[in-house]
Amino acid sequence: METKHMQNKPPVNLMGGPGRGRGRGPVMINEKPKQAGKTLKRLIKYIWYSKGLFIALMIVMLIITVLNLAIPAIQGSAIDCLSPAVTGGIVDFDLFLKLLIFLIVLHIANSVSTYLQGIFSAKLSQLTVKKMRSDLFAKIVYLPIKYFDTHRHGDIMSRMTNDVENISNTVSQSISSVISSILTLIGTFIIMLFYSPILTGVSLVSMGLTLLVTKVLTKYMRKFFIRQQVLLGSLNAHAEETITGNKTISAYMLEEKEKDKFNDISDELKKYSIKAQILGGSMGPIMNFISNFGYLLIAAVGGGLAWNGIITIGTIQVFLIYTKQFARPINEIANQFAQIQTAAAGAERVFEIMDTESELQIEGDRVNIRGNISFKNVVFSYNKDEPVIRNFNLEVQAGQKIALVGATGSGKTTIVNLLTGFYDIDDGEILIDGINIKNISKKKLRENIAMVLQDTVLFNDTISKNISYGKDNAKIVDIKNAAHTANADIFIERLPDGYDTELSEGGSNLSQGERQLLSIARAVLKNPQILILDEATSNVDTRTELHIQKAMIKLMSNRTSIIIAHRLSTIRDADLIVVLDKGVIAETGNHDELMKNKGCYYNLYTTQFAGKEI
């Protein structure tokens, strides 16, 4: 990359596409959620996409709640059937047997309903996260290049996998549990009031303690769970960088350094995870203690009321069951809070990507691009007050071959990035055939541009699919002709499966030169009006380079070609050579003219070929 800002800013990998670069910019994550309420509302909207299933789940949960509330009351009635104090000394065995059979039926119905709840929860969870993943991926593919330059790829992947998985677990487990608990809480409270307002008041003591403890614990839990998710994203990002950069790490013998860095992140993750899990795990035991305290309090008060004949023994039994049932929803909500916290933190990270502004897709005129290009007073900077391109003016006629040369950081690749619309200029305008590129649809603009990059991007697919990438429904004969033009057919036909050979990730089962030949074949097949060559032959040997240059002469015929070159021998026949220096044009002309001027180009050329005949 030839941009000045890279001297002290995060690296920019604009031309690589998928698989290139590992954007090492800062991870844009907030330590604390800004709008937790808004995040939960958006989650509910995703759940509501499967509203039929959600309603079915609510109905089943309501049935379960009613059954759970009815069973203790019937149990109390059955006990009173056997109590001489209630029946006046006559035990009603017939009613007791009927109530017993009814209880068995209710328990069976409860089991079936619980089974259906599990099925509906699982389906709702998967449908929700499927929709969320689809929306997230659809957003990612339209994010501007700038986003990937300033966010670590491993962290983006963590949001797609870990954070969404946490949301899935919450939808399948926590949401149904919390809603069921709320319904149970309301129903139990009403029934408890019906049986004994005095004992209900006693129960509220334990509930007050529960709410107080929950408020205190959650104050500390939230920050630990958010930090845990941030560190998990950093860990994934570092792992990805280490795996993709393993050759460089080995070459510089920095395995121990990378291992130590990984362990440092892992240690911090362990520290925060332990704190988060301890706080989350302590919620349950504390709630159980408060619940048991309330249970004993009710037993003591209830015993006194029964002794004075205010309530029956069956009522005490029923009330103790309802007390447990009253405390259970509070405990479940408390126990699920840790999971909900994690999911909320993850959802906010997911929605942060979704809320990022997409690359502007102009619905401009679908003009027939011929290839005339004009740069007029173009100014651009990656960071304010640090211009990379300044007052850049250049006229390129359709069919011309233009070479951009200059030292590293002079702005060569930045010019190409601006032409393709990867970045928007700060001032001035770029015209194609007299039309501002801001008024041309990105689709129309880019389908008329083909790029052959220094770092080849290949996908885990067949050779023929990689060559035809960018041109749907290409015929095999056209694919073979493109490979022949690029001199790639020689090595392809030697492979056991030929054009059907499956490439591994990044095409790692091919040599560097073979991968570059496939990239050139892809550009040949696309048959663009504008061709961009970014050090297209830098990764091949001298003999292969000669073959490629011959193919390039055919490829560049009758189309506008922009060549970024360090090997100045490859652009001697360019119609116009533009020499860049710190974002401005230092000089222009053809090879012979620039050599006669003995300026910047002359110095670059003679330095590169020092000791050789010029």
Image: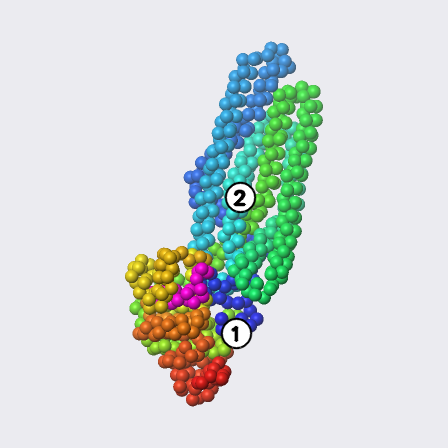
Answer whether residue 521 is magenta in the image: yes
Answer whether residue 409 is magenta in the image: no
Q: Which of marks 2 and 1 is nearer the N terminus?
A: 1
Horizontally, is 231 left or right of 433 in the view? Answer: right
Residue 104: where, in percent of width, then height? 52, 22
Q: Which residue is drawn at 49% across and 35% down?
A: 117
State the separation of the CA atoms marked 2 and 1: 46 Å
Task: Please tell me the numbered disc located at residue 170.
Answer: 2
The answer to which of 497 and 211 lies nearer the viewer is 497
Task: Please tell me the numbered disc located at residue 297.
Answer: none
Which corner quadrant holds the C terminus? bottom left
Which residue, as the protein is rendered here, is positioned at the far top? Answer: 90
User: From what the image shows, is residue 604 above or below residue 124?
Assistant: below
Residue 586 shows up from this direction: no
The magenta-colored residue range is: 506-525
Residue 260: where, in percent of width, then height? 63, 59
Q: Residue at x 62, y 30 (%)?
A: 323
Neighbor class of circle 2 (other Cα within 10 Å; few <14, some 14-19, many 20+) is many
Residue 362 quadrant: bottom left
Q: Name the residue under label 1.
A: 4
**Mostly what secondary structure, the magenta segment?**
helix
Q: Nearer the viewer, mark 2 or mark 1?
A: 1
As shown in the figure, which amino acid type bears the numbered disc 1?
Answer: Lys
The answer to which of 371 and 266 lies nearer the viewer is 266
Neighbor class of circle 1 (other Cα within 10 Å; few <14, some 14-19, many 20+) is many
Residue 207 quadrant: top right
Residue 264: where, in percent of width, then height? 64, 57
Residue 333 quadrant: top right
Residue 215: where, in percent of width, then height? 64, 44
As shown in the figure, which amino acid type bears the numbered disc 2?
Answer: Thr
The answer to which of 338 and 217 lies nearer the viewer is 338
Q: Residue at x 50, y 32 (%)?
A: 114
